[in-house]
Amino acid sequence: MQLDEKMQPQKMGFREYIEALEEERRKIQVFPKELPLSLELVTQAIEACRQQLLSGTVAEYNLNGQSECSEQTSTDEGPVFEEFIPIKKRASPDSVEEEDENDDENDEQYSYKHKKGNTNDKKKSDWLRSVQLWNPNPPPAKEDVPRKANVVEVKRDGGAFQPFHREGSGEGKTKNVSSAIGKVPSSQPVPATSSTGPVRVEKDNGGSSKREEKGLAQRKQRRCWSQELHKRFLHALQQLGGADTATPKQIRELMKVDGLTNDEVKSHLQKFRLHTRRSPIIHNNASSQAGPLFLVGNIFVQPQEYGAVATSTASGGELTTVTTPTGIYAPLATHPPAVTHTPIMKPQLKQLEISQHSHSEERANHSEGAVHSNSPASSSSTHTTTTSPPS
DNA sequence: GTTAGAATAT
DNA sequence: AATATTCTAA
């Protein structure tokens, strides 16, 4: 427990890190033109590292208490120099790091950024950008040590999302356990598979007598809509025939995410609808490399997305892992007229029985007012706002 | 009593 | 801005 002992390894880490950086720089130097910034950044980083080394100081881990579900890409290990790396990864067209999120892989939150040097990003409000990994609100220590790395995701069939704890103190400060956002539920009595019910796993505070009841209806832990989560959400929407026809419950059931509640879905859906109606089009700053926008029906999509949509559409409901690396999905344009409409057909294949549990799943056969005629152009709910507010 | 949706609240 | 909660009508 000597400071010195601690010191050494850290310095070693630095040195190695510097070496790695230098090697990186060598590689980059080959393309000074394409990666001018990278070059500089790396150089700076190296410089900084050296100074750190010399001064014997060690960079502090940035334990930012992320109140929101913010990201945290660091695979930790080694000194953290994120500070030197002004985000903005993927700057070059040839950068190959697109790991489309595999469902059962920890698809790190990818709050991808648009390039900044490019067109001035006017639209920072792209809400899509915020979807990232679900932040499980890691209960600070005292439980079980973080075992696995960040393995959070679901299996397409099982649904293994974290059950979500609700800590006592309102607004869990989330000390941010540096790395592991992961951690498998393990000890939760959650059936995992079926559980279509609102599995509200409460933190059993049997021993802790902090302040419990007392009539405080503490606010729920905010659910973070990770990419994965959102992806599922979208899948469900597709199957249900779009955001306008899907209902929260149906969505939730299709998503098969355990711990997910109706209200959460409802809320998300509400937001989704709002946004999709409001922002008719994707910001055109995608000029970078995202390629042109395609107009399909009344939906603008980008090539990838289009493919994805088309795929799942064509395959008759079987979702083929819609890879949406960018996290962009086409907002329903409230674009009535204009352009030549390529008739798109919204797959309305409900009754897609994916359930494997023998629970009487009613849904699927809608005999209510859910009979939507899917006509691309004219559909979309009867929205003749003729509301005449009385007083 | 349940659910969806809008309106608020945080 | 993103979620949660409340309110209201089916």
Image (cartoon, coloured by chain):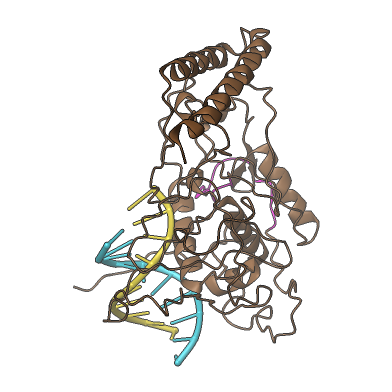
Chain colours: A brown, B cyan, C yellow
| Quadrant of the rendered image containing residue A187 | bottom right
User: Measured from the top left, where is residue A248 in percent x and y?
Assistant: 53, 70
**Start-end of magenta stretch:** A328-345
Residue at coordinates 44% horizontally, 58% vertically from top-left?
A: A140
Visible in this render: residue A99?
A: yes
Quarter of the figure that contains the C terminus of chain A? bottom left
Front-most of A103 and A280?
A103
Front-most of A333 and A91?
A91
Front-most of A12 and A197?
A12
Main SS of the magenta part reads: loop
Residue A186 placement, left or right of A6: right
Front-most of A246 and A390?
A246
Residue at coordinates 51% horizontally, 33% vertically from top-left?
A: A5
Q: Is residue A342 magenta?
A: yes
Q: Residue furthest right?
A: A315
Reply above or below: A85 against A180: above
Reply above or below: A158 against A10: below
| Quadrant of the rendered image containing residue A171 | bottom left
User: Measured from the top left, where is residue A283 in percent x and y?
Assistant: 49, 35
Reply above or below: A51 against A102: above
